[in-house]
Amino acid sequence: MPASPSTYQLDEALKRYFGHDSYRPLQKEIIDETMSGRDVFALLPTGGGKSLCYQLPAIVDKGLTVVISPLIALMKDQVDGLEANGIHATYLNSSLNKTDARQRYAKLFAGDYKILYVAPERLMLSGFLEDLRQWNVSRFAVDEAHCISEWGHDFRPEYRQLSKLRNFFPDTPFMALTATATERVRNDIVLQLRLKEPKSFVASFNRPNLAYRIETKQAVFRQILKFIQSKPFESGIVYCYSRKATEQLAERLQQNGVEALPYHAGMTPKKRAENQEAFIRDECKVMCATIAFGMGIDKPNVRYVIHQDLPKNIEGYYQETGRAGRDGLPSDCLLFFSPGDVAKQLQFIAEISYPKEREVAKDQLRQMVHYAESRDCRRKVLLGYFSEEWTAGNCGNCDNCLEPKQSFDGTLPAQKFMSCIFRVSQVSSFGVGVNHIVDILLGSKNEKIRKWGHDRLSTYDIGQEHKRNEWQAFGRELIREGYIDQNAEAFGTLSLTGKGKQALRERSPIQLTRPALAAQKPAKAQASTGSIECDEDLFTTLRAVRKEIADEKGVPAYIIFSDVSLREMARDYPVNEDQLTEISGIGIKKLEAYGETFIEAIKEYLAANPDAERFNEG
């Protein structure tokens, strides 16, 4: 059966404007549904190609596609990228002066644009909805749609007003897009946006090109510095818990020769924008940031994301790690874990005013700690949080699969730990935390032990066969496995659960994980998922050419060509336009604008390196 005109138009536009011959998973199905006029909910992982789902229909459809995006700082990059591909797009936000805004309004009334980016706040400004009615809006695309749900990790009250759009545009199709949302949040998005019988698409949450690793936090600055120095030409983000920590880390990295800048909500908007721009344009290699940084960041070649401190929940962690490797090339996600971080988080949770909110925060932290300390495949735990089952066994790209943790018969230490909690409860009217139990087991002579008479317990000084950090790890694992309850509202005090009391009474066998006593070595994937082997010297040359063009045009380097495109060039050595069009991501507009420059650079390289054609063989 011959392809319908719409399918032909879409496929032709995909190649002409974006340089692709095929779609990523679910993109075609999502595009077909929105083209039919139906409401769509789409959950695609970061790097899964959400933007194309509304950009491609906008090109072949009549009218204007309105994209609602939460961060005005990113709209310019989105528009620059579309214009570089020959697609007429614009944005309206508070960064524009009156003259620029008037010019854009005039072109909108003239129908000159295919895509308009706006922030949710602007939509409800006096007169703006009336203007929209005159601009022949063909669809609304709500990006970062999880912001509309108070159950989401990044709720934004201004998103709530979007439901009013239905009153003004009852028959215009809506598209809600997000990269991360639990089932509860997904249902809330559909409800809040008043989507009408939407077709829902939920892609796998698995990011196969990301390598997940947890390391014990010891001398954390030296650990971070060593990792960053091993990747001198790559861009990365380091997430820190506090504003002060971002500034201290950036300063120390600078003192050690690393191009690093801080980013947090306490900085002036101007300074934040300057630092973000420097990172996006590769003038700064490392961004040290709080969670205020990153949502919607369109930089595809972030090669690593480091968490210096424990995130509050898995959903936020997944979103933050998802900023690495958006182009599909191998990237690292490294989290430094410390029991002290857990205690710090529990203290903050205890200060939350509302009991329900406290319980939610406590549960989210418990899941995050389970992820950090689990001996299971990292992917299995992450995907399980989003109700997706991992059935492939060893993923080959996380520390637990590459270097499995050892388990052992931990019945005796478990019995000692739980017995100690039981004995304390017998002689004291109050509970104690993990560290106090460990002090008893190790025979500490500190003031509290003596004052409360805990040095007279039968469990006092019976734990000399294990070190302090081992006992702490055993305690956390018993909490994780449901033998012990830790009360966040009472300073992390411990008590035995029904399961724990039964195990203590019946001396049930318990398996524990042997703690890592030394700093772990970085786990290395056997085969980096998504890697494109190429002539690294040529890749470096092409990257320099790209940077020169980008600087001249005042745009980020990835607007010119992605790392994927450059690595394919450095693998295939295209020396004419026909060969260059076979490279991923090179459409007609970019071929005309930059093709000759890159072909000449490749020819010059081959002339100077006649043996370089080895990557073409076979």
Image: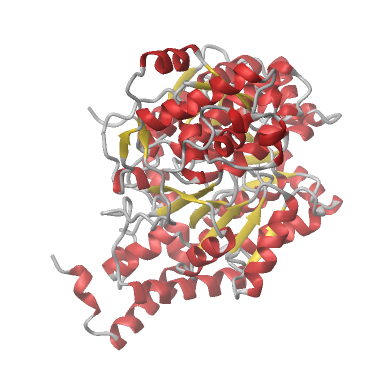
Q: How is the image coloured?
A: secondary structure
Q: Residue furthest left?
A: 618
Q: Is residue 524 left or right of residue 475?
A: left
The residue positioned 70% from the left and 55% from the top of the image is 245
Q: Is residue 58 left or right of residue 270?
A: left
Q: Quadrant of residue 603?
A: bottom left
> Which is more toward the observer, 506 or 377?
506
> Which is more toward the observer, 158 or 608?
158
Quadrant (top left/top right/bottom left/bottom right) for the N terminus: top left
**Which x, y percent locates residue 143?**
60, 34
Q: Is residue 601 left or right of residue 324?
A: left
**Which x, y percent locates residue 512?**
37, 33
Q: Relative to 10, does residue 366 appear above or below in the rendering? A: above
**Which x, y percent locates residue 450?**
68, 35
Q: Is residue 407 left or right of residue 52?
A: left
The residue positioned 55% from the left and 24% from the top of the image is 421
Q: Quadrant of residue 270?
A: bottom right
Is residue 530 visible to us here? yes
Q: Quadrant of residue 250?
A: bottom right
**Which x, y percent locates residue 425?**
61, 19
**Total tally of numbered discs in the picture:** 0
Is residue 141 visible to us here? no
Quadrant (top left/top right/bottom left/bottom right) for the C terminus: bottom left
Q: Residue furthest bottom?
A: 608
> Which is more toward the observer, 495 or 416?
416
